[in-house]
Amino acid sequence: MAKAYWISCYRSISNPDALAAYAKLAGPSIAAAGGKFLVRGMPAKTYEAGQDQRTVMIEFESVAAAIAAHDSPGYQAALAALGNGAERDIRIVEAA
C-alpha cells in the first residue's frame, strides 16, 4: 500500500489565537492517527503562483489513514477551534 501525504497550504491567517488553539488539538489527534509531521513552517522560496504562507506536510501509511485522521472526532474538534481563523488548501495525495 502506498503512503499518503496530507498537504496544507495556508492562504491567510486572520486569527493567530484560533490557529494556536487548533494546533494544540490537531497535533496530538493527527499523531494518534499515525500521522508523521514532515514539514511545518514558512516556505524557503515560492515559484509561479505560490504564496509565502505557512505550509504543513504530514505522512500517513495510506490515503485511508489520512482521510480517517481528518474525519476523526479529535481533528474535527481542532477544526471547530480554528473556525474562520485561517484559510487553507488541504490535499491528500497518494505517493507515487
Image (cartoon, rainbow, N blue to C red):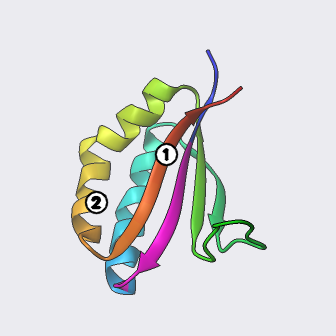
Q: Residue type at mark 2: give it.
A: Leu
> Is 75 left or right of 3, judged from the image as shown?
left
Q: Position of residue 37 (x, y in %)?
A: 61, 52
The residue pinned by badge 2 equals 79
The residue pinned by badge 1 equals 91
Label 2 Cα neighbours within 10 Å, binned few <14 / some 14-19 / many ≥20: many
> Is 60 left or right of 66, judged from the image as shown?
right
Above or below residue 37? Residue 1 is above
Majority SS type along the magenta span: strand
Q: Residue furthest top?
A: 1
Q: Quadrant of residue 86 in the image?
A: bottom left
- Element on which disc 2 rests: helix
> Is 9 left or right of 76, judged from the image as shown?
right
Q: Residue type at mark 1: give it.
A: Arg
Label 1 Cα neighbours within 10 Å, binned few <14 / some 14-19 / many ≥20: few
Q: Position of residue 50 (x, y in %)?
A: 64, 67
Q: Nearer the viewer, residue 35 or 48?
A: 48
